[in-house]
Image (cartoon, grey):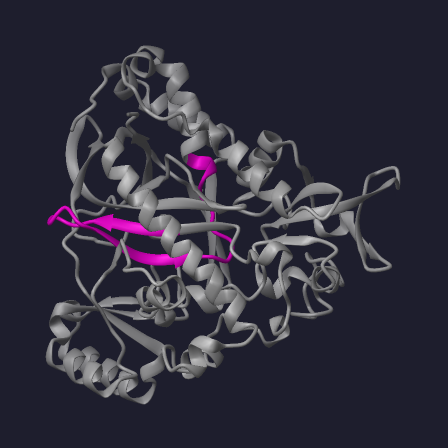
Amino acid sequence: MEFYDMDLFQNTDKVNKLLARYGVKFGIYKNNVFHEQLFPFDAIPRVIGADEFDYLEKGLKQRVKALNVFLKDIYGEKKIVKDGVVPEDFIFASSGYMAECEGVCPVKDVSSHISGIDLVKGKDDEWYILEDNLRVPSGASYPMIARQLCRMSSPKTFREVKIEDNRNYADLLKKTMDYVNTGGLNVILTPGRFNSAYFEHSYLAERIGATLAIGQDLVVEDDVLYFKDYSGKKERVGAVYRRISDDYLDPMNFNAESLIGVPHIYDVCRKGNVALLNMPGNGVADDKGIYYFVPKMVKYYLGEEPILKNAPTYLPFYDEDMEYVLEHFDDLVLKDVAEAGGYGVVFGNTMTRQQKADFISLLKAEPRRFIAQEVIDFQDMDIMDGDQIVQRKADLRAFVLMADEPMVWKSGLTRFTRNPDSFIVNSSQGGGFKDTWVLSH
């Protein structure tokens, strides 16, 4: 299904210049070096039919429900471990597991309030989930602001095509925060204006009417969290959408060297006096090793068959899977479970003989550290390359927000690779993004 509009094409450069002016950039630290760059926008939208999105919506709601139950269980009774569904090695050895979260019950039993689920559509027309992001998933602001600018550039397009309005993400996020708010302000906690995602933090705060704060603006007194403005006036805080990673959130409970967190904020959360979105410790559920077990979680906790499929995945931790990986090494993609952003991903068929031998030695020495997956031949999408239309690989980050029930945003972040030989679409690897149009019924 194609929606090619010359107004949109002709204004692509203009839209990208406006995005740059608004500071729509991203950055990443690697090897102690910070790189910041623009996130290029492509005007050809990804289009998803109404019925197809209904199917995705059901599957995404089911998956996020199961993951939330898993998080409550794993920091509580650990029934899924006791019943032998998930080996304890995959819990306590996970880099995302945090012992400080043991026994902490989040407000209204919601741990992952904003989930970013990454999917691809194979050439077999099946959707496959590649990854669950339950810590601090980002990216919703990009299609929001891009759609806004595209509406200005080509209003005729949006009058003629019946698509879901993606401006309601702000309403979904506000509903999510209000649902768990313990009484007080809604706050978006940012590391500060020099953070690469500061645009998103400030944009979302403005859209939902929340208070944008840095760590120094928040103070804990008598087990209550307060926002303190420039005049010294204090207001109680009821919910914090924190855009700071677990380690740096609270120097008194996590990394003592953090200068951007809020001392004792987790103590207030532990007592149920403030809601943290998302909860610390969620990383144990989006570990790439745990990903293998999510379909089993759906069956175990919900008593349902999974609607959406994982990519076929093997755990070298298991002897039979190790045997399969070694036999089919050249046909697989290997992923380091501790890495993110497209790093730590290697394709067996791209290695030299020596690289392969070295990697297999490491795999045998640290089998818990890696997963192996079949390479899904996912669909190419049209993108603009100068004045030419070319095809590149693309994924979709769907956003699921949890209040009394999970809510799936009828839009999403479609990321694509600009390298014709690459399957890795992450922005940190030089990719771009496009709008996601969900057609209306």
Relative depth, front residue between 225 and 325? 225
Q: Which quadrant is home to the C terminus? A: top left
Q: Residue at x 24, y 43 (%)?
A: 418
Q: Residue at x 19, y 26 (%)?
A: 387
Q: Residue 170 location in percent, x, y?
A: 53, 33
Q: How many marks?
A: 0
Position of 182 with respect to 119 (left or right) is right
Relative depth, front residue between 432 and 86? 86
Q: Quadrant of residue 436?
A: top left
Q: Residue at x 19, y 38 (%)?
A: 381
Residue 430 appears in the rendering: no
Q: Residue 241 location in percent, x, y?
A: 61, 48
User: As displayed, is residue 299 above or below residue 27?
Assistant: below
Residue 332 appears in the rendering: yes
User: As displayed, is residue 76 above or below residue 439?
Assistant: below
Position of 29 with respect to 252 (left or right) is left
User: Which residues lie in the magenta part?
Assistant: 117-142
Residue 148 falls within the magenta-colored stretch? no
Q: Which quadrant is home to the N terminus? A: top left
User: As displayed, is residue 134 above or below residue 247?
Assistant: above
Relative depth, front residue between 81 and 212? 81
Q: Residue 32 location in percent, x, y?
A: 51, 64
Residue 124 falls within the magenta-colored stretch? yes
Q: Residue 363 location in percent, x, y?
A: 28, 83
Q: Residue at x 26, y 31 (%)?
A: 50
